[in-house]
Image (cartoon, rainbow, N blue to C red):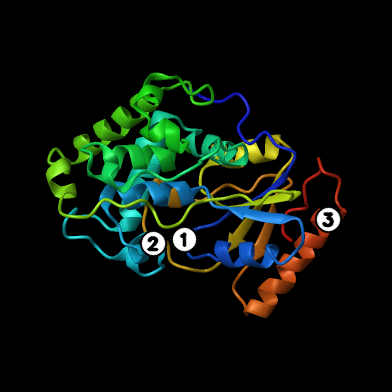
């Protein structure tokens, strides 16, 4: 199941591509200093989902150092969970899933109210919380029993089908998942992905796959490659990088922060002055 037009919005998109620790987050922060710019990481709902599915702490889910440390309970590091769930689970289910999740965030359903804490003791609570993050469900869709069998028109799945999908993936990886998960408290994720309204530019901070870059280019967006002479952290497919295409921009990040800021500023000025459907010259 693939959406016909992920990321269909009036916002112009700048996708940041680069290996881990190449400086994508730093470049995104620099771009956010400009008016009319919002930022979104395709990995934000992934991290929220992993946080609730596997009981990750804030440092493990969101910190730079905590995500590299092996978790004895699971035999994986948070980064390995992000790769596993993001790629083998969800991209295996639909290669466009995370693009669709970004589109969902642009047109998110109301999430009025929070789940009653007593519901967090339900046997399937982690899968409901996980689906709420990974699919962008409303609180009602995730927790109202009557809503469980109502198809979500965007995903063409019912919430119950989403819960079952995550349950199947979890049990395939860990047949004793339920028993292991009981060793950690079940709580909602502490950070929610949001795209600020009334902005003209949307920065996607973590473009990792060719299909993601292709969609951005096809809808008139731009792909910026952040290049830094740093050792690749691992050989997972999400860290293979994106090929440079005509119209892309390459930003070198092998100097000082001031030098990087200058290169980002120059590229940004060209974006502001360019036709909405025309890319930038490679090698900026």
- The residue wearing badge 2 is 233
From mark 1 to mark 2, how far is it between C-alphas? Answer: 7 Å
- The residue wearing badge 3 is 272
Left or right for 100, reference 118: right
What's the residue at 43%, 22% (across, down)?
157
Please provide percent x and percent y for residue 142.
Answer: 39, 34
Q: Secondary structure at mark 3?
A: helix
What's the residue at 61%, 36% (across, down)?
107
Decide which of tag 2 and tag 3 comes sooner along the chain: 2
Please provide percent x and percent y for residue 191.
Answer: 45, 56
Decide which of tag 1 and tag 3 comes sooner along the chain: 1
Please provide percent x and percent y for residue 207.
Answer: 55, 48
**Residue 83 seen in this snapshot:** yes
Q: Secondary structure at mark 1?
A: loop
What's the residue at 40%, 43% (across, down)?
86
> Which quarter of the rendered picture does the C terminus lie within?
bottom right
């Amino acid at each position: 199941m693939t959406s016909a037009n992920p990321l269909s919005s009036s916002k112009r998109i700048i996708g940041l591509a680069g290996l881990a620790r190449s400086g994508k987050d730093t470049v995104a922060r620099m771009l956010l200093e400009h008016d009319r710019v919002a930022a979104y990481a395709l990995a934000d709902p992934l991290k929220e989902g992993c946080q609730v599915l596997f009981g990750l702490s804030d440092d493990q889910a969101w910190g730079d150092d905590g995500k590299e440390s092996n978790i004895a309970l699971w035999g994986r590091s948070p980064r390995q969970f992000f790769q596993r769930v993001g790629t083998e689970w969800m991209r295996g289910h639909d290669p466009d899933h995370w693009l669709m999740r970004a589109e969902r965030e642009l047109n998110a359903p109301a999430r009025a109210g929070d789940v009653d804490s007593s519901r967090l003791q339900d046997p399937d609570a982690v899968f409901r919380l996980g689906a709420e993050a990974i699919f962008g469900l409303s609180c009602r869709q995730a927790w109202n029993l009557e809503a469980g069998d109502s198809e979500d028109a965007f995903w063409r799945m019912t919430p119950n089908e989403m819960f079952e999908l995550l349950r199947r993936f979890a049990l395939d990886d860990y047949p004793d998942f339920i028993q292991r998960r009981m060793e950690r408290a079940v709580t909602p994720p502490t950070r929610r992905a949001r795209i600020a309204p009334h902005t003209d530019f949307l920065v996607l901070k973590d473009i990792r796959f060719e299909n993601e870059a292709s969609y951005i280019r096809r809808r008139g967006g731009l792909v910026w490659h952040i290049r830094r002479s740093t050792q690749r952290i691992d050989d997972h497919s999400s860290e293979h990088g994106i090929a440079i295409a005509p119209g892309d921009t390459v930003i070198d990040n092998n100097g000082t922060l001031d030098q990087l800021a200058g290169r980002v500023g120059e590229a940004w000025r060209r974006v502001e002055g360019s036709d909405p459907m025309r890319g930038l010259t490679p090698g900026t």
